[in-house]
Image (tube, rainbow, N blue to C red):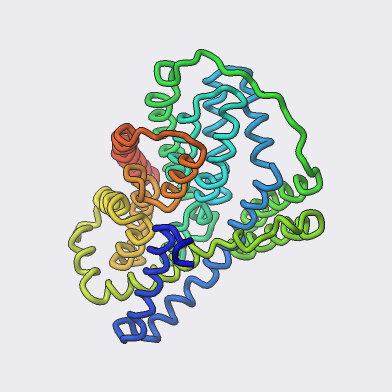
Amino acid sequence: MLRRLGVLDLIRVGLLLLGLVFVATGLLPWAEAVGSLTEIGPLLVFLVAIILLAELTKEAQVFDAIAARMAVLGRGNYAALFFLCTAFASFVTIFLNLDTTAVLLTPVMLALAPRARIAALPLAMTTIWLANTASLLLPVSNLTNLLGIRKIGLDAQEFAARMWVPQIAAIAVTMAFLWAFYWRRGERRDLRYTPPILEPVADRALFAAASAGCLLFIALLLFKAHVAVAATAAAAIVLAAFLLRARERLTWSLVPWQLLIFVTGLFLVVPTLSNHGLSALMTWMIGGEGDPYRAAAVGAGLSNLINNLPAYQAVQLVIPAADRDLLLALLVGTNVGPVVTPWASLATLLWFESCRRHGVKVPMRRFLLTGAGLAVVGLLVTVWTLVTFG
């Protein structure tokens, strides 16, 4: 079994085992461990449900149909296709989580590329950059948002009301960088592309059920349902359709066990380290002035160093709940900033693997330099809008 596990899987398992060792040795008190795991219970339910919903929606060819119709609607015009692709990737990230965009939308877009004779790299960069930078608007958009929403003290509508201007700013900066470095003619080389021939979906009933499930999830969020309840209800509809029509496609691989053990281990390891010196280091890094730019920079820097989930969890522990602006600025750092290193977010790691499987070469030097530029400009502009329009 160990031989079948990849490096990332071994790291996730190791993190969980380390957390259990901390509990067994008393480095993390039992009561604190139970409290930490109780806190993430609804979060884990949401993760399973939303990823199941996204996976089955992809299996029902909903993403494929939308992507193909976007290419047809663009009529060979790259500028039109650019705006359609950025809108689609942003929408999926906002409502179905950044991992859906990075893991499920990426292969759909890469499969579209040869059919329409479109350069693959611009499509790939669109999905991964917007998977990160378009994840500010709703709690469900990013796991970091869900980790922080209770401490921040806002419901989904209040959170969106506070973050919609920063979100627009982050997407606008991302679009500017995408066009300048990957989409303009000098980068993509082709003047026009060939609209693909539309193909019928394999099972209209599954397609309809998956579409209905996604729409139900969005509607329940608008009516202030808990994210775990909304995701579970939506996933149940799609799961029932697959049970009736394509039971053989339901496998245990749909369950995101890697993410579950990573989050569980994270909520055991980070509190332990915080009790033994990490909190003092984080307090020194963000300073005592309550500077949102500094908090965002620390969040982005740590994200690109160690990954955005442990970075957010470690820093938010030392920020008072009353300092809402600082917590929101930290979210900007850990959401918009992880676009530099391949390990900055789980979404980026999984995206690289998807590109490798599809034979898409990502020039590392170009990825690092353009990502660094986007991180710096994106953070400055987004935090400025947060402070100015907050």
* Residue sticking out furthest to the top: 191
Say if 270 sits above or below 178 in the image.
Answer: below
Residue 115 drawn at (x, y percent): 62, 26
Q: Residue at x 39, y 51 (%)?
A: 345
Question: 322 and 191: which one is in front?
Answer: 191
Q: Residue at x 43, y 20 (%)?
A: 184
Q: Determine which quarter of the picture holds residue 368.
A: top left
Q: Determine which quarter of the picture holds residue 240.
A: bottom right
Q: Is residue 294 left or right of residue 210?
A: left
Question: 366 and 386: which one is in front?
Answer: 366
Q: Determine which quarter of the picture holds residue 34.
A: bottom left
Residue 169 drawn at (x, y percent): 41, 37
Q: Residue at x 46, y 45 (%)?
A: 351
Residue 359 drawn at (x, y percent): 48, 35
Q: Residue at x 41, y 64 (%)?
A: 12
Q: Is residue 57 left or right of residue 6?
A: right
Q: Is residue 265 left or right of residue 72?
A: left
Say if 71 sits above or below 248 in the image.
Answer: above
